[in-house]
Image (tube, rainbow, N blue to C red):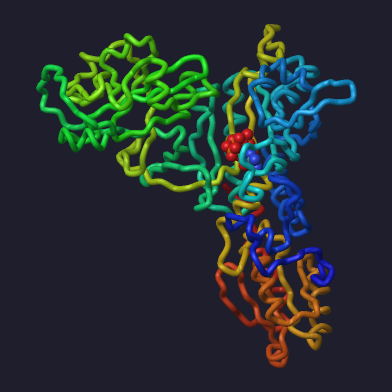
Amino acid sequence: MRQSQLFAPTLRETPAEAEIISHKLMLRAGMIRKSAAGIYTYLPLAQRVLTKIAKIIREEMDREGGQELALPIVQPAEIWKESGRWDVYGDEMFRLEDRHQRQFCLGPTHEEIITTIVKNDVRSYRDLPLRLYQLQNKYRDEIRPRFGLMRGREFIMKDLYSFDVDEAGLEESYQAMYRAYTRVFSRCGLKFRAVDADSGAIGGNSSQEFMVLAEAGEALILYCNTCNYAANVEKAISKTVTPQFDGSIKELELVATPDQKTIDQVCSFLGVAPESTVKTLFYGTGSEYVAVLVRGDDQVNEVKLGNLIGGNKLYLASPEEIHEVLGLPVGYVGPVGLEKYQVKIYADLTVKDLHQVVVGANQSGFHYRNVEPDRDFNNVEYVDLRTVKSGELCPHCDGRLSEARGIEVGQIFKLGTKYSKALNANFLDDKGQSRPIIMGCYGIGVSRTMAAAIEQNYDENGIKWPLAIAPYQVHLIAVGADQLPLAEQLYNGLLGAGVEVLFDDRNERPGVKFKDADLIGIPLRITLGPKGIAQGEAEVKYRHTGNEERWNLNDIISKVKDYLKDNDSTDSKI
Ligand code: ATP
Ligand code: MG
């Protein structure tokens, strides 16, 4: 491609709207332009990167038995009503009506429609398994579209759905996708980690997210530095350490704690550590309140709580609201005697093992001390509800957990029979019995992966594309008009050798050309300048390392071919 003809309007200044690196650099490198919040045009350079990511994905899906199809974006409301998700999906769904006032949506995901397709044409176990996928725009009216392509309202996703006859088949499909995803992100040149993920209302240990490790990531990951345990903070567990206890059980004691309302205040007033206190929080579900008890030094994990009580309207009730509704004093609420208030009480597992703890006494200005949860709490259900912190012990080995930020680029998920039961997608097994198909679903954010690649590969001058997904492999620069004839020759030679070349044939100052080259970030830069040519050489610069070399003009094509071969990840043996 001749750069004089390329539509890549680069910008010197960073547009004010961009907050994170990938957004800034894609705007500056002339890759994307915004149409509306979370809705973007992909200009030619971006389109080339997306096409490359998509090609890698297609190859790896096909290698694991995937078959590509294309489902409609516009989907009838009926199937979403049948699955029960028309109402549950809420404001995130783009809804529309046709001229006959029939309701439709723009697909945010495609379980309903693909299950309907499969159920109509799959009859017997002989028609299974199936692994069907597509690459397509998805539509989600995100509450906060932001960070450019990272959280768009229109974005590209690869979604594959697996259909199996039994759990063992689903396990195979799931592992096949795990392998495929590992190869996809490795081939894209990304540093990533697969982490245990929250699987929402479906429960079970049946979902993993693929996280590209980068500062800008919205997700917090905890990972073991000894074994390969890694989990999203929403899901992470740890081996907890119970504070030391001398074995003496004391009598419950009411103590005056005037004006001591926060954990910190109470702790310093009574001279106790936060891990020897229990705090009581209230969550509203819209129809009722539940009380949640965690150690004073812990935080409630609202995702775990949401899964437990199934509330998608879950919110933390203010102490004032609880005072108004239940008559409990602000700042002095506690679990002793709380059963009288007719609320369901949940406590984190760590609370059960505590001794001689301090809690609010449900009387203004007073706390209890020497509380024994076993003896003094009634009607409490113990479950895992706390948020794990960096430095805690790994649940599987003796290692410790560390924190990192990650960008979720993919998720794999065992669905089981959730959709096949709701939509009656059954098959006849080898004994002629009708059974629901066992499903899985597997998504990759294609446009988000492009942004994530930049978040991991950039410097102050611009992008550093991993070779496999770079818009071009080689950036050929003619410093001035005098070098153009030789550069033309080399350009044609490289094209003839099958190399993807961007040829800067523009009538621009060298400084402008080099700045644009750094910004666009093509991995290998070959510059023809007057000095080098005089010595029969070209200047070569690797964008990733900044290393410079001089290549003999006669060797360039074979050296480029060697470079591409040495760095090829197509046959990644993962
Ligand atoms: P998130 O938690 O980031 O909102 P999600 O878990 O809702 O994502 P999935 O339904 O698992 O997303 O979709 C599969 C993949 O699609 C995600 O792993 C992510 O890479 C991508 N994706 C999801 N939402 C967006 C979005 N708004 N913009 C860009 N990519 C997205
Ligand atoms: Mg997800």
Q: Position of residue 49 (x, y in %)?
A: 71, 55
Which of the 4 quarters of the picture holds residue 253?
top left
Name of the residue lying farthest toward the right: 99
46, above or below 254, in the image: below
Q: How many marks?
A: 0
- On screen, residue 398 versus residue 129, left or right, reads left
Name of the residue lying farthest toward the bottom: 534
Q: Would residue 8 be visible to someone looking at this image?
A: yes
Q: Would residue 563 be visible to someone looking at this image?
A: no
- On screen, residue 114 versus residue 205, left or right, reads right
Identify the residue shown where x is 42% and y is 42%: 222
Which of the 4 quarters of the picture holds residue 547?
bottom right
160, above or below 458, in the image: above
Ligand 1's quadrant: top right
Q: Nearer the viewer, residue 418 or 105?
A: 105
85, above or below 483, in the image: above
Identify the residue shown where x is 52% and y is 21%: 311
Identify the residue shown where x is 66% and y is 60%: 15
